[in-house]
Amino acid sequence: MPQQDLAFWQSRAAALAIEGRAFIDGSYRDSASGRQFDCISPIDGRRLTAIADCAAADVDAAVAAARRSFEAREWAGLKPRERKKTLLRFAALIRQHAEELALLETLDAGKPIGDTTSVDIPGAAYCVEWYAEAIDKVGGEVVPADPHLVGLVTREPVGVVACVVPWNFPLLMAAWKFAPALAAGNSVVLKPSEKSPLTAIRVAALALEAGVPPGVFNVVPGGGEAGKLLALHMDVDCLAFTGSTAVGKQIMQYAGQSNLKRVWLELGGKSPNIVLPDCPDFDRAARSAAGAIFYNMGEMCTAGSRLLVHRDIKEMFLDKVLEQAAQWKPGHPLDPNTAMGAIVDQIQLDRVLGYIEAGRAESRLLCGGTRTLSDSGGFYIEPTVFDARPEHRIAREEIFGPVLSVIGFDDLDQAIGLANDSEYGLAAAVWTQNLTTAHEVSRRLRAGTVWVNCYDEGGDMNFPFGGYKQSGNGRDKSLHALEKYTELKSTLLRLR
Ligand code: NDP
């Protein structure tokens, strides 16, 4: 077993063959126009490969392939246990190719290799396994009805499902959508972000190798325009999206302008992490608060970007958080010891630095605040902490970078008011020893996930994931996600 250090991963990266074409109806192909865009690594600004820039003709071809395979019932018509077998093979192939996929993800998105090998790729394989295992165990209902009737309520696949996904967890976010959609018998058109298309393109071939029929799983890399075309498409039955709230709002409009396709949105967040004076362990809470905002470079929809601390303990706790922040030094993403990698691209780097400038103007900078490792040609930002007030821009808007706003409060009601004073409602956390306080605060927090005495726990698939308010609708993960990709049908049989 070779030693897996930076040199090991660099040599693997140098030997990597990278596919950049679209995957439509069971084979790789260039875009119809022949147009391509460059795939740039945020690690060092180097061009990795050219990617097919899919436009209307490609989106139409992918949707037509999905429709044909769906109508022919090549996948939807299989026994659930046959779909399960195929999806388990697909998951096994993802695991078999884990090293290659982790490398692609790290090169493409700048995520630390330690994370892509331990979280992103195994997480995606596990997600596919989970829905594979579930699909031959969920059934419909026989409901109470008049004595002369038999009443059945069944779930049927919606048809053609488009998945439009972001760049922060490229394969994992895609899997959260395509796995339940495929398990339920749909045909899928996946559009990865143009910032991180490589793993989506690669796993399409693995799905085919596993036995997913041609046309059932298609990948159309392209920019926002390809996503818009899918959202406006008259033959897409359902669109599942993860990304910004602004684009989520547009997608709902596109659905209204076209065929009222079902739209499921997992959007942004500005999640509060509340530390009360009776926190059971301040050291663990500080470590967790730093991880909540610096893990994945802060490019997390659930990032604990607002740290609300009771004023009685604020100074003491801030010292601990700053100590922890120092542990998150940016480094080379291919070095297994690196905790914080590169920001995904120049645009996101500029966006985060813009927020830091806004923060410098109105809040008090406590650490970080600058770009670093510029000589590499890549995009790195130091972990940054501000002492802020709730009305400051950095404390209200989603930054999607390693920037923490610490806000003081005087009592519990004020903390809950501040926590809920956001257009978002994706996640929240509270630290307290008191069981009653824990339950009461959790109930009052308007968020899809609440953590008590932890943050970002729950890597298994059993918990529904999604937001209140402008953080979106519907839920990824868990059996509830199957509801998004199925229609309910009532069948009434008259006996006499
Ligand atoms: P977007 O919301 O623009 O991108 C998400 C996905 O939607 C990508 O595949 C993108 O394609 C696609 N897309 C873009 N425009 C359209 C459109 N008009 N119709 C349909 N699909 C579209 O996120 P950004 O990459 O621009 O990031 C900006 C901000 O969004 C971040 O700073 C962060 O605040 C937030 N965000 C939140 C995420 C979350 O997990 N909740 C994830 C990513 C971003 P393409 O990338 O190819 O343009």
Image: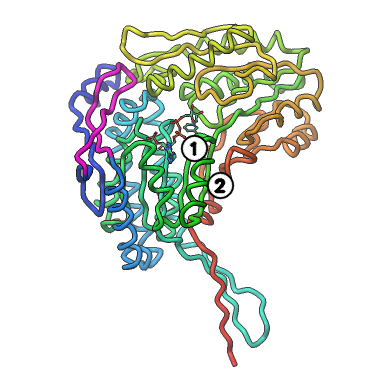
Q: Is residue 179 magenta?
A: no
Q: Ligand 1 lies in which image quarter?
A: top left
Question: At x 29% / y 18%, what residue is drawn?
Answer: 45
> For residue 441, which quarter of the picture?
top right
- Give the label on residue 491, or none: none
User: Which amino acid does the dot numbered 1 rest on?
Assistant: Val
User: What is the quadrant of the C terminus in the image?
Assistant: bottom right
Badge 2 residue CB within 8 Å of ligand 1: no
Q: Nearer the viewer, mark 2 or mark 1?
A: 1
Q: Relative to residue 340, is residue 63 depicted above or below?
A: below
Direction from residue 238 to residue 68 in the image, left or right: left
Q: Which residue is mark 1?
A: 247
Question: At x 52% / y 46%, what residue is drawn?
Answer: 253
Percent x, y of residue 303: 56, 27
Sequence-wise, which precedes: disc 2 or disc 1?
1
Element under label 2? loop
Which residue is situated farthest in the bottom direction here? 496
Q: How many numbered marks does the figure carry? A: 2
Question: At x 58% / y 31%, what residue is drawn?
Answer: 269
Badge 1 residue CB within 8 Å of ligand 1: yes
Question: At x 49% / y 37%, what residue is drawn?
Answer: 247
Residue bounds of the magenta highlight = 33-53
State the separation of the CA atoms marked 2 and 1.
18 Å
- Give the label on residue 475, or none: 2
